[in-house]
Image: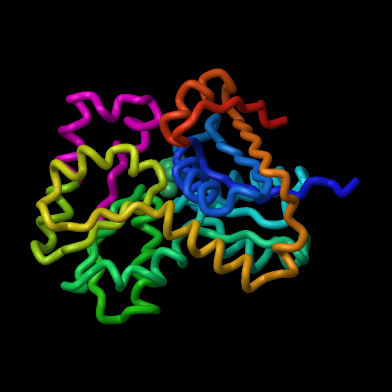
Amino acid sequence: MKESSPIGIFDSGYGGLTVFRSIAEKLPDYDYIYLGDNARSPYGDHAFETIYQYTLECVEWLFSKGCNLVILACNTASAKALRTIQQKDLPSKYPGKKVLGVIRPTAEVIDSFTKTKKVGVMGTRGTVNSESYLLEINKFFPKIKVYQQACPMWVPLIENNEHMQPGADFFVTEYCNALINQSSDIDCVLLACTHYPLIMPKLTAILPAGIEILAQGEIVADSLVDYLKRHPEIESTISRTANKSFFTSGDSKTFDEHAAIFFGEALQSGKMK
Ligand code: DGL
């Protein structure tokens, strides 16, 4: 019997489930394995070396489960670890395996969402300080001006399920104002953290009307569809029994209780061993 080779999807915690949800809708036939490093999340304020080490460990664990393709459904890991994994670890230790991130696919299409060519990027401190979005967007669209805002309180609020409480409004408003005060011409705000779609209703209410608020799920899913078409050598190795499994480095029961809000349906996870 052919061994299962699922697509691996990784995030520091729950946020990647918002991306996985869009991917599974677009590509329902493949097998998937999701890993959330909840025991060590949030990643946003960790040092570069720490984020790289944690991400590499999780990618290697997904490889050990048969994955030939892993998506880092986490902006912080994509910003801080992806390049080293792609340039150093894969060629020397895992030739033939692929790891993709979420920053490049988003940067590639951002132009179609802005008329003023002034884009706001909201992310974790790690993502913002890496300047990855500035660099990637300017590579593709040098005329776009990018304004960044770090939102360090949002992931902890979301991970603790406090994000829809009235108390969360203070931090949502504070970071939105700090972004908009940088330029009143911003007409597109990119949620450059896979957790942030969970606060979409609050963002829509607080950001000025007319601003497009962009979540990454669909963009990353479309980009994966395109990638698999262009890479039959990888696509042909992925098993197709429409199986989805979920793992966490944290507590499975807690993960299952929270994860449904992100994934849109109930699920049962196992403990990463
Ligand atoms: N969801 C992750 C992202 O997209 C990060 C959350 C964290 O700080 O761990 O950046």
Q: Is residue 79 above or below residue 32?
A: below
Looking at the image, residue 157 sits to the left or right of residue 41; the answer is left
Quarter, ligand 1 = top left
Q: Which quadrant holds the C terminus? A: top right
Rendering colour mode: rainbow
Comparing 84 with 205, the one in front is: 205
Q: Position of residue 231 (x, y in %)?
A: 67, 71
Q: Position of residue 106 (x, y in %)?
A: 41, 64
Q: How many marks?
A: 0
Tell me which residue sits at (75%, 62%) in the image.
236
Residue 180 image-quadrant placement? bottom left
Q: Is residue 121 above or below residue 134?
A: above
Q: Position of residue 85 (x, y in %)?
A: 63, 60
Residue 216 image-quadrant placement? bottom left
Q: Position of residue 174 (x, y in %)?
A: 15, 42
Q: Residue furthest top?
A: 253
What residue range appears in magenta?
149-175
Tell me which residue sits at (60%, 39%) in the image.
35
Q: Is residue 157 above or below residue 119?
A: above
Comparing 272 with 114, the one in front is: 114
Looking at the image, residue 131 sits to the left or right of residue 66; the answer is left
| Residue 47 shows up from this direction | no
Comparing 22 with 63, the one in front is: 22
Tell me which residue sits at (33%, 51%) in the image.
123
Tell me which residue sits at (38%, 25%) in the image.
160
